[in-house]
Image (tube, helix red, strand yellow):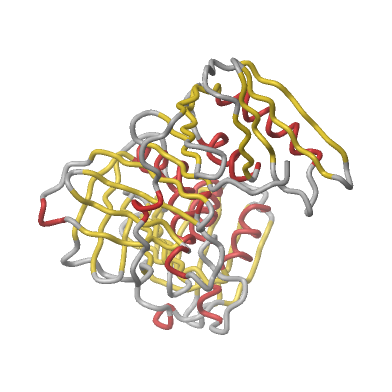
Amino acid sequence: MKFTISKEAFLSALQQVQHVVSSRTTLPILSNVLLRAQNGRLELSTTDLDVSIAGSVEAEVETEGATTLPARRLATIVRELPSDEVDVSVDEKNVAHIRSGPSYFKVMGLAHDEFPPLPVFSEAKEFRIEQRVLRECLRKTSYAISTDETRYVLNGIFCAFKDSMMTMVATDGRRLAMVEQELEFPQSQEVDIIIPTKAVNEVQRLLDDEGELIIKISAGQIGFDLGNYFLTSKLIEGNYPNYRQVIPGESRERIALEREPLLRTLVRVSLLLSDKSNSVKLHFSQDNVEVVANSPDVGEARESVAIAYKGPEMVIAFNPEFMMAPLRNLASDEVYLHLIDDISPGVLRSGSNFLYVLMPMRVNS
């Protein structure tokens, strides 16, 4: 195998696929990237047996062929090469000779036929969606994914394609983020799946502001076809809890809040919190909310924010990190906090398609 490629294109492609590679693996081949040079392109693939990614870039191919090389080491070498052009040749023993300007590297590889085959999606359900829209949906929900591995069905995003709507939900039991997006697809394509965290993180990195992608779903697998890159992942098997039942019904108060000023206030007030005392109180009174953090061992912080509020006085406490997470990931200037009382979950809404349920914290007055 022999090809010439631009350093920038080679490095960019390696950086896109190397994240999948596990640093702790018992199979040496899983630390490698599969390189295949053919038809004027260099194809690159990596896998950890759960998540796989394949991409391709233009290259001048002199001799077609395939090999596998250590992914992270190869990316490090290419990043440091002195010239804009890179020549790579690989002999029959899978030894790669990399030349760029005055630099020469010899890297030991492994045979390409040892590399695990990537999943095939022959009879898959397909959904077309704008990359920008999917990225927005994932950004609004992914921070609420549970990291508790004992409840593995919560270690991902639940995604339902039903009634011409794509619904995404993430929860860790103490908060829940949900976004709904209209999407055209035939009724026969309706399906519920759980996409694991690693696949969510990887696809968010690949998504762009422009263009469309195709989501492919087959038995136990999902694929994201972005044109130059194709990401595949195993799905989480199991039944996702009934999230609809934790969304409160009618609220007594609907309070308009400016997102950015509220976020800045929460950031400042949270500076006084400690491990023992990790809640902020929101004290609502006429046209005002006072945000208070009180740690007996550290001190106290309070800040008032002017709001349009005409309801009765109310004090409710939330975990500040949980309250700040959606505010960081929304783009709208205004959000609405729906409250029933000081012991019922609060609901943060933005636009017509996003809601966030937040359990209150019990604190001594």
Residue 298 is situated, as x and y percent measured from the top left of the image, at 88, 43
Question: Quarter-wise, where is residue 282 in the image?
Answer: top right
Q: In the rendered view, would you say 152 is above or below 162?
A: below
Foreground: 124 or 277? 277
Foreground: 306 or 185? 306
Q: Is 158 left, or right, of 324 in this rendering?
A: left
Q: In the rendered view, would you say 331 is above or below 45?
A: above
Foreground: 41 or 359? 359
- Residue at 28% across / 54% down in the picture? 160
- Residue at 11% across / 49% down in the picture? 186
Residue 335 is situated, as x and y percent measured from the top left of the image, at 48, 27
Quarter of the image with the N terminus in it: bottom left
Foreground: 98 or 113? 113
- Residue at 56% across / 66% down in the picture? 148
Residue 140 is situated, as x and y percent measured from the top left of the image, at 46, 41
Question: Quarter-wise, where is residue 251 in the image?
Answer: top left
Q: Is 85 left, or right, of 113 in this rendering?
A: right
Count of numbered badges drawn on the protein? 0
Q: Is 20 left, or right, of 183 in this rendering?
A: right
Question: Quarter-wise, where is residue 268 in the image?
Answer: top right
Q: In the rendered view, would you say 140 is above or below 192?
A: above
Quarter of the image with the C terminus in it: top right
Q: In the rendered view, would you say 1 is above or below 195?
A: below
Residue 206 is situated, as x and y percent measured from the top left of the image, at 44, 48
